[in-house]
Image (cartoon, rainbow, N blue to C red):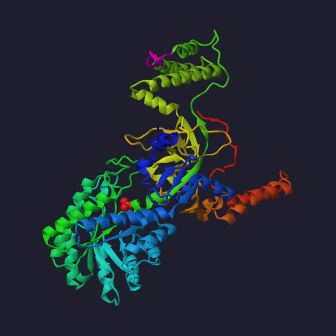
Amino acid sequence: MTTAIEQTVETYGIENWGAGYFDVNRKGNLIVHPVENDSRAADLKEIIDDLRRRGITTPVLLRFPQLIAGQVRKLQRAFSKSIREFEYQGAHMCVYPMKVNQQRAVIEEYLREGTRYDFGLEAGSKAELYAALAMDQSSDSLLVLNGFKDEEFIKLAFIGAKAGKRIVIVIEKLSELDHILRISEDYEGALPMVGMRVKLYSKGSGRWEKSGGEAAKFGLTTTEILEVIGRMREADRIDMLKLLHFHIGSQLTDIKRIKNAMKEAARVYAKVRQMKVPIDLLDVGGGMAVDYDGSKTAFDSSANYTAQEFANDVIYTIKTVCDDENVPHPTIIQESGRYLAAYHAIIVTNVVDEIETVVEDISPMEIEDDDPQVVVELGDLRETISVKNYREYYHDALEHREELFTLFNLGLISLEDRAKGEVLFWDVCERADKYAQAAKYISEEFDDLRRLLCAKYLTNFSVFRSVPDHWALDQLFPIVPIHGLNKQPTEYATLCDITCDSDGIVDKFVDLHDVKQVLELHKLTPGEPYYLAFMLVGAYQEVMGNNHNLFGTPNEAHIWIDEEGYLIRKVIRGTTVGQAAERARYERGLLHDGFRRQVAQRVKDEELSEAEAAEIIDYYESRYDAYTYLAVNGDEGRGKRRRE
Ligand SMILES: *Cc1c(COP(=O)(O)O)cnc(C)c1O
């Protein structure tokens, strides 16, 4: 017998995408384990209640640093296991690409765990390098520099080498080599290493397919590679050339494509090595995918391999090619970002309300004899619709609705008639939907109807700030209520955010076999908060999130999980209203002066008393410190709103 909790775990697919970190406790609350299926667990509902008592309201970004460490360990173990199994002679090291999530809390936690395995960092811009240079890394770990570089960038890299970092400048463009050779001419001290990014013929799969292949934005062609080698030899700097790099894209969904790229890259490595170039590092880039929907397929939001399979294929392929070419096995550098960062962050927020889109009857509706014919006919449909005729009647209702609007636009029926007709139309739809859902085969038009009829939950967040890839790339993120999971959800809903943008919606949800158009959720109870968690948002979402409508960064809490439950180690307040305005160059002083000036004029015109003026100025200026999101205070703002 399956319990209600087991059923909801299945409904939301928690076991499929949760990687052993997430589960539901006996209270029906969503919990987080610091390590897969550990006995220690943090109850998300308790954390949110606790934060609320401290005045920290939703939306809240919860950061679980232990999950970053957990992913680092998983990756390291997978590779060390394959290295042993295939008797690979080289080592494996990771460099975390900062662009995935540069937050200091993330980098520090990654390095804290990663230092044990000589995991380092990857920076792709001057600002990332500037931040990275001050971080403590283990002395053997690398700091790899990708991206387009000017002379200033390269100068900073040389400075870093002098400061003791093991830096690799990866050449993306030949002009970078000019800078490197010039700076190294009259340079004394520890030199950085140099790498070459190669343009592979092989492509990845999934959304970032364009990152690989001949037309890719990055990387050197074969002739350019030979030119770099030639020129470095000529300048007597060939000893600096230590690394070969490629990266065929993020969220690589298909293991076959990865294997092909590894084969090609290993062959290039071997050929370069045979030219007596002292390279011994092969950087295989990032791209290890996160199975967001848990389907274990080559679908865009999934991956058809595990970390172990990925490691096995990388190690085995490179070993085979190197043995064949008779060159030593290189140390494998990996730049996995998404895989390490995605799990650790969760956005929790509250559903504010339900937005009504379907017209519902407010008072019991009577059809009168003198009602227009079209209203009477819709009334008939409503009374006589059945399992046998629902398809036909639904089509009739669609026609009658057209007629209703035509008559209204011609001025032939009243506003009251139109309202009556609309209510009847939606009644017929709801009944047709019930029959359709009970049928064995549901045709597409009734799927569309279901989407139209489903509830729209107004959710206190901005899609553009918190899950921008859902908006920009249709990427799926698992979404789960954090409480009430001991009860089966009874509603179907899509989510609307609080921005004034019709794109600010979530209407695609993870599913094992397909993409769900609606999400199963519980009925809202007036006066009781309903909290949803957006899971696996630790990679890219924070950095890519934008200021649409001036919604700022959410409140943030860092959670440590121990035997007793959880510890809130740090709370960081989100952007305030004043700070958000300042991002658009509305400085505080300027705004407060401007407001005071207008109020002073009103006092002068005797429209306001001095006391009233003082009061509104006080209130206005106090708003500087307010949260940019909707305040959560009990019942306020509840009750159904209508929209059409
Ligand atoms: C973005 C990027 C990565 C990270 O890729 P993930 O898919 O997050 O692992 C690694 N290397 C380079 C060069 C990148 O541009």
Q: Residue at x 55, y 62 (%)?
A: 563
| Residue placed most toward the observer, 69 or 526 | 69
**Quadrant holding ligand 1?**
bottom left
430 vs 189, left or right, is right
User: From this viewpoint, is residue 473 visible?
Assistant: no
Q: Please give the count of numbered marks on the rendered protein.
A: 0
Residue 313 position within the rendered picture, expressed as x and y whole percent measured from the top left: 25, 60
User: From this viewpoint, is residue 456 visible?
Assistant: yes
Residue 513 position within the rendered picture, expressed as x and y whole percent measured from the top left: 37, 40
Residue 51 position within the rendered picture, expressed as x and y whole percent measured from the top left: 64, 57
261 vs 588, left or right, is left
Residue 269 occupies quadrant:
bottom left
388 within the magenta span: yes
Q: Residue at x 55, y 14 (%)?
A: 383
49 vs 95, left or right, is right
- The magenta stretch spans which residues? 385-393
Q: Is residue 89 above or below residue 558?
A: below
Which residue sits furthest front? 1
Q: Residue at x 46, y 37 (%)?
A: 1
| Residue placed most toward the observer, 408 or 426 | 426
Which quadrant does the C terminus fall into? top right
285 vs 520, left or right, is left
Q: Is residue 171 above or below residue 41?
A: below
| Residue placed most toward the observer, 175 or 124 | 124
Residue 211 occupies quadrant:
bottom left
Residue 416 position within the rendered picture, expressed as x and y whole percent measured from the top left: 65, 21
59 within the magenta span: no
Q: Is residue 249 above or below residue 369?
A: below
